[in-house]
Amino acid sequence: MARRNDHSREELHEMALSAAQALLDEQGVAALSTRKVAAAIGYSVGSLYQLFKNLDDLCWQLNARTLEQFQAELNAISAQQPREIILGYGEAYLEFAHRWPHRWHLLFEHKSQGSDIPDALQGKIVGMFEYLEAALAQLFPQSDADSLQRSARTLWASVHGIAVLASLDKLFLNQPALEQQMLNEVISRYLNGWQQEKMV
């Protein structure tokens, strides 16, 4: 077993998060534990608790990493028109859920043991929605902030529902590119409906 002074605090922190992420990717949310992470890096559980308050804290920091990764992918979307941008965000969400299912599930399945979500993580969650709100604001510049926030979350909830059902193989239709078709429909019909309301 390694000694605490074999690595700096920063190195040990990175080692622990990388090991936890690998464990998550390989075995899923239920496999995460401080004992397994400590064993993977060759340190004691006590050493791990010098870096993280508890398992909640470890999971929150993993979720923060996941959101940073996802936001980097949103930044890489090259579409110019707001409708194309919004569709690109939806496609990126479905693709991310397919590629990193356990990271994605941890974002929604982890239940804290009575601790509040840290402000830093809350900020990253809000930041994720701000991408969508900004694109919606381009389409509907007269909309107030409350409407944009609500609509961003409505669209996200719809796309998230498609992702969840697809991950469970519960879409109940055997059609090619079904998720993409559903994504196109839910986004285009929502935006068309909002546009028609604005024209009335």
Image: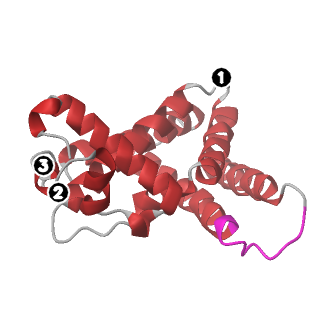
State if disc 3 and disc 1 touch (CB < 8 Å): no
Q: Amino acid at mark 3?
A: Ser
Residue at image point 66% right, 70% down: 165
What is the x, y in percent for residue 11? 23, 30
Along the line of sight, the residue nearer the viewer: 127 or 176: 176
State if disc 2 and disc 3 touch (CB < 8 Å): yes
The residue that disc 2 covers is 45
Q: Amino acid at mark 1?
A: Ser
Q: Is residue 29 visible?
A: yes
What is the x, y in percent for residue 66? 43, 44
Label 3 CA crowd tier, 10 Å (few <14, some 14–19, many 20+): some
Q: Whole-Å distance between the Cαs marked 3 and 2? A: 5 Å
Magenta part of the chain: 166-175
Residue at image point 16% right, 53% down: 44
Depth check, mark 1 against mark 2: the one in front is 2
The residue that disc 3 covers is 47
Q: Amino acid at mark 2?
A: Val
State if disc 2 and disc 1 touch (CB < 8 Å): no
Image-quadrant location for residue 12: top left
The residue that disc 1 covers is 78
Image-quadrant location for residue 163: bottom right
**SS class of the residue under badge 3?**
helix
7 left or right, relative to 70: left
Q: Going from the N terminus, do you reach mark 1 or mark 2 first?
A: 2
